[in-house]
Amino acid sequence: MKIITDIEEMKEFSRNLKKTSKKVSFVPTMGKLHAGHKKLVEEAKKYGEAVVSIFVNPMQFAPNEDFNTYPRDIESDAEILSDINTSCLFYPSGDIVKNNETFLIDPKYSEQFEGVFRPGHFQGVLTIVMKLFCIVEPDFAFFGLKDYQQYILIKKMAEDYFLDVKIIPVETVREKCGLALSSRNGYFDEEGKKAACAFYEALRKTADLFKTGEKSAEKLTYFVIKELINSGFAIDYARIADKGLNGGKRTVEQGDILLAAARFKKIRLLDNIFFG
Ligand code: PAF
């Protein structure tokens, strides 16, 4: 596996791949890799040469968030990527965001769901992903469905800017209890872990209620809120939208999505489930 830290070298590596008619399959990450990331890379490999970036992007953390303590383990990450036959690890330095004065924003979607609770987050995400796309010039890029709003925003960005990259969503990898894998799961103690499992369980029960015939968005939303409160959560939001993230639904249909974020003590959880 080639490890590249230099921006120009990364551009050259990608362009050389393309010269030999290979496709560049890109997985942007912030590292501390887990089985969810491995699944993204396995998917990426089906489409071309897998290039994975690791960069903990300061632009997407608010001052009160965990940028300084965000888990980092580049040695172990590099080993994991090499073991699964990643072609290239791009590990840029902070220079990639140094002196940055232009930003990408998406006013419509950024101010809903996560955007309300993490102001500036999606501006940081879109800006870094655009920078990475300009450097790596991927043919395909892979994003986990756990961060559904992020996936939708990046897909929209690629369309709006006529980027030659196809954005591919990848299913969330879960623990046995349903908890979505996340680099932040290491923050949980035993009590937190139990609560985290209850979080997805509440979403799952709501999707089950839909399956048994309840179609009212109000009743389903009320149900999930009650479940979360009973499990000890302080809720940031629990909302139902269509797959394009348009809310305001009265009747829930197959293919709609329930998105939720809630806090248990200091731990914040984010997840979603499709109604099927
Ligand atoms: O999902 C993530 O890990 C990050 O938001 C991303 C897409 C790598 C941008 O920093």
Image (cartoon, rainbow, N blue to C red):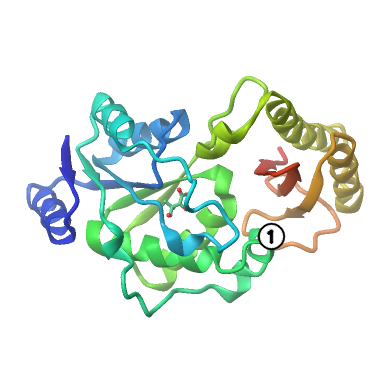
Q: Position of residue 167 (x, y in %)?
A: 41, 53
Residue 243 place in picture, x, y as percent: 64, 53
Q: Residue furthest top?
A: 176
Residue 200 appearing in the image: yes
Q: Secondary structure at mark 1?
A: loop
Classify the position of the C terminus by image quarter: top right
Q: Is residue 46 left or right of residue 197?
A: left
Residue at numbered disc 1 = 113
* Circle 1: residue type: Phe
Q: Residue at x 21, y 47 (%)?
A: 23
Whether label 1 lies within 8 Å of ligand 1 gets the answer no
Spot the residue most to the bottom. 101
| 163 sits to left or right of 103 | left
Quarter occupied by residue 274:
top right
Which residue: 68% across, 27% down? 193
* Residue at 85% in and 34% down: 231
Q: Residue at x 81, y 37 (%)?
A: 206
| Other-residue count near label 1 (Cα within 10 Å), few / some / many at <14 / 14–19 / ≥20 | some
The front one of 266 and 113 is: 266
In terms of image quadrants, where is residue 63?
bottom right
**Where residue 5 appears, x then y in whole percent?**
19, 51
Eyeballing the image, is 76 above or below 20? above
- Going by the picture, which residue comes out furthest to the front? 68
